[in-house]
Amino acid sequence: MTSDVTVVVGERLARYGFGDGHPFGPDRHGAFLREFEIRGLAKRARVVEAGRSATAEELTSFHTPAYVEFVRERSQTGQGYLDAGDTPAFRGVFEAASVVVGATLTATDSILDGSSRRAFVPIAGLHHAARDRAAGFCVFNDCGIAIELLRKRNGLKRVAYVDIDAHHGDGVFYAFEDDPDVIFADTHEDGRYLYPGTGASHETGKGKAVGTKLNIPLPPGADDAAFARVWPQVIEHLERFEPEFILLQCGADSLEGDPITHLRLSAATHGRAARELAQLADRLGHGRVLALGGGGYNRTNLAQAWNAVVENLLA
Ligand SMILES: [Zn+2]
């Protein structure tokens, strides 16, 4: 059966987590999958088992070789942190993080080779990792790696990255701040109230890239209506630059009831974002949208938001 949406899941992907009881625990994958089955989406989507790891060459398309080596070493002992104290090392973290990147690249390839027009990966969208360091539960930045490879390996010119996670996608933003071919749009809780503290509206890109980046901070407590007032700016911003591929980091920590943030969106907003980006991609003539799960620490919320995304990509 052909389907419009590839969904990459599986036991290897579920291993990326920082232990039971941690906000980013390995049970997030199962929470998504249960709701995915209940809604009958597993029958409508093209489900692909996460298998391959990213290669060293793929990791270093974005990250520095020294950082990749550092993660490999810490992964053997499983001791200490991968950053200043947010992202703990665990035994096998290198392999687990490489499988996340591999899953994102499997999803990307499924779109480029025509297997489906859209794709979704639940445990992915690790948008805080910088080129040379981990940050905020993010070891390897699969979004940044996909953006690099879409251009270097697949020959696309302009790629768009949209981020509706409660946290600013700083790892993606600063890596491409001066790159005019990465069209960036990010709604997030105002950095004065939430990690990582960046993403002010005056941050619009540097040098030749000025104007290609759109940051929209939302006040704590912002709801669907507040989101609806700013979202058309995101669509207009992308439409102006006609990207050849659209990534959506659809972090579910922007929903009401998340334990570590203060926005009050509902899953309907995530569904709407996915639907309108898919419609935009269709208007641009290619239909390509890759959605990546991102954050989300309330299990019910992430199951609702991510399945709303898949449903709307299928529509
Ligand atoms: Zn987040």
Image: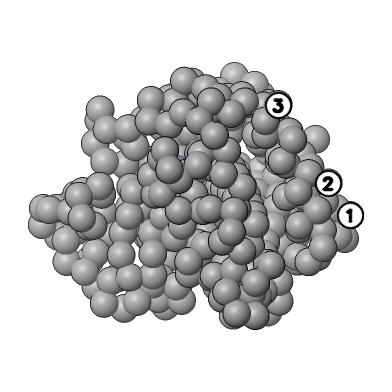
Check residue 225 in the rendering and tell me which mark sits there, or answer none: 3
Q: Position of residue 288 (x, y in %)?
A: 74, 56
Residue 155 screen position, x and y as percent: 68, 79
Count how many numbered circles sit on residues in the image: 3
Q: Which mark is residue 187?
A: none
38 sits to left or right of 53: right
Q: Nearer the viewer, mark 3 or mark 2?
A: 3
Figure quarter occupied by ligand 1: top left
> What amino acid is at disc 3?
Ala
User: In the rendered image, which quarter contains the N terminus?
Assistant: top right
Does the residue at mark 1 contact the one at mark 3 (Cβ under 8 Å)?
A: no
Task: Reply above or below: 78 against 253.
Answer: below
Residue 279 badge? 2
Which residue matches tag 1?
283
How dense is the environment of label 2, judged by Cα within 10 Å: few (below 14), some, or many (20 and up)? some
- Examine the rendered structure and indicate whether residue 220 appears above or below residue 234: above
* Residue type, numbered disc 2: Gln
